Image (cartoon, grey):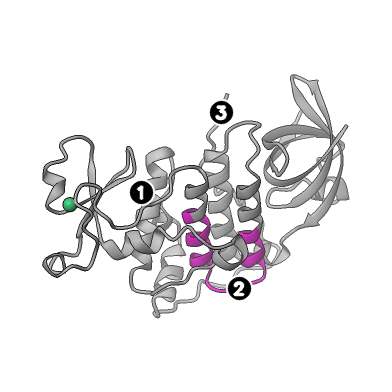
Amino acid sequence: MAEQEVLILRSGRYLDSAKIVTFFSREGGLGTGFARGATSRDNRFGASLEPLTRSRLSLRRGTLAGLARILHADVIASYPRIRTDYDRLVWAGLIVRFLLGFLPESHPEPSLFALACGALDRLDGRVGPPAAVWEGFARQALALLGWGIPAAVCRRCGRTGGEKEEREEAESHYFRASDGAVFCRSCRLAEGGGELWGVEAEVLNALSRNGGSVDEDVLSPGPGPLLRERLAFLDRVIGEHLPRWTPVAELTFVGSAISGFDGDRKLPPPRSEDEEVDPNGGGEHDQRT
Ligand SMILES: [Zn+2]
């Protein structure tokens, strides 16, 4: 028997009276387990295995079709304020979909686990705009996975953003997603291979700040006007690795949350407190085998 601290990402009914749960474990990475007698969310065992719950599980390895059996679970954090705020739930759902899409099976990613928990704590604590929490999470999570976004420095000539001759053009640099290389406007013509995306130097530089601890840096409001461009660029990078990724701007009223962050605040319609929403958004379910 082993104890693991986990974030529940997804759960569903299994057979008549069991629940099958996909979780992100600090100790073991992405895993799946089943629990008998946990089908009702009214009982404590069931509640501790609901998506978007941080719990401590007692597991017994490989008892059914190779799945771990969850014997016992204690809630560490249930993020009640995310659950009752549809806006925050949608942003938290992006984090869940990101983890389900990117995490390899059974490979520990303790830094990413800490980052995800830090971002959910901030969404739940209503610390700052949710769009900024998502941006900070996505930027740092990509870096932890080896797909960090580089600063606007041309790989060939070393030209950085903001130089005089580049200022006329909004898209001063070009990013190649296949290897994460960046080129300036002049050098991109000499680079034959791979699709190049035009991007503003300021967007790259804002997204490339990989330093800082999770606590200090998961929230990175930055300047407002380019937030939409930064989120769109993150979407594009994520979509390169997860083809079924739904861009942030396509999620209902996340658009208004972004325009609100730009200073044009439109509040989403009020939601009843007990409305149930699937934090997985019904979207990304990349099954790895
Ligand atoms: Zn160059």
In the image, 105 versus 21, the foreground residue is 105
State which quadrant residue 260 falls in. Answer: bottom left
In the image, 102 versus 280, the foreground residue is 102
Q: Residue 236, labelled with which disc?
A: 1
Secondary element at tag 1: helix
The quarter of the rendered structure image containing the N terminus is top right
Kind of residue sitting beneath label 3 = Arg
Q: Is residue 229 in the magenta section?
A: no
Give the Cα distance between marks 3 and 1: 22 Å
Expressed as whole percent of the image width and height from the top left, the position of residue 46 reads 82, 45
Q: Main secondary structure of the magenta part?
A: helix
Q: Earlier in the sequence, mark 3 or mark 2?
A: 2
Range shown magenta? 118-139
Q: Earlier in the sequence, mark 3 or mark 1?
A: 1
The quarter of the rendered structure image containing the C terminus is top right
Q: Is 125 on the left-hand or right-hand side of 168?
A: right
State which quadrant residue 252 falls in. Answer: bottom left
Q: Is residue 127 in the magenta section?
A: yes
Q: Is 158 on the left-hand or right-hand side of 24?
A: left
